[in-house]
Amino acid sequence: MTDVLIDPELPDDADEIRVLNNAAFGQGTEGAIVDALRSASSLTISLVARIGDVVVGHAAFSPVATESPGALVLGLGPVAVIPSEQRRGIGTALVRAGIERVREAGWHGVVVLGHPEYYPRFGFVPASRFGIRCEYDVPDDVFMALELRTDGLRNCAGLARYHAAFALAAP
């Protein structure tokens, strides 16, 4: 991996983050989701990957509501890397750094709606193992959870709801 620095998003990064999300996903939906999360002060952890002064990757973590009072769960996504830098480990570095920050901040777990071949490398398993269901009608293997502390997701059974911004991309 080229000299990549992973840091928290800065206020001046918003435009670059939107452009790279739109380029990575080939549409404007994910960029709009991140902008809406930011506007709602719901980007709990927002990391960028930089090569020099250029933002080449981004990972967002935002609160997910569960039916369990007191559950501290974040949703991971979107995660994006500019197409010219994909498959070089930048996305992996962003996800690993984000998970570590989420753990350090005391959250109980993370859920992700994503590729079942990609996210298990970080310890994600189908969220159904914890009794957690996604608000969207998706296959069991694409809605995953990662427990960040012993029994952290034990009492989180039920429906998980993402921020309203995600309705822009609802499957």
Image (cartoon, rainbow, N blue to C red):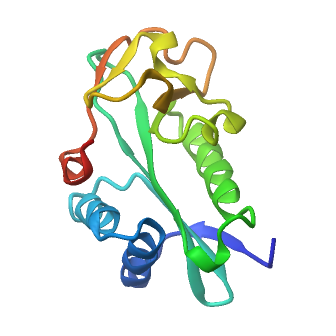
Q: Quadrant of the C terminus?
A: top left
Q: Is residue 57 above or below residue 165?
A: below
Query: At x 67% / y 30%, what residue is drawn?
Result: 123
Q: Is residue 75 above or below residue 142?
A: below
Quadrant in the rendering for residue 134: top left
Q: How many marks?
A: 0
Q: Is residue 91 visible?
A: yes
Is 71 on the left-hand or right-hand side of 86? left
Pinpoint residue 14: horizontal percent, then vertical percent.
Answer: 37, 78
Is 56 on the left-hand or right-hand side of 113? right
Pinpoint residue 117: horizontal percent, then vertical percent.
Answer: 63, 38
Query: At x 40% / y 70%, what residue is drawn?
Result: 26
Front in this rendered view, residue 138 or 74:
138
Pinpoint residue 86: horizontal percent, then vertical percent.
Answer: 65, 68
Q: Quadrant of the N terminus?
A: bottom right
Is 158 on the left-hand or right-hand side of 140? left
Q: Is residue 59 visible?
A: no
Quadrant in the rendering for residue 136: top left
Q: Is residue 140 above or below residue 155?
A: below
Quadrant in the rendering for residue 30: bottom left
Front in this rendered view, residue 71 or 113:
113
Q: Is residue 90 above or below residue 55?
A: above
Query: At x 26% / y 67%, what residue is drawn?
Result: 32
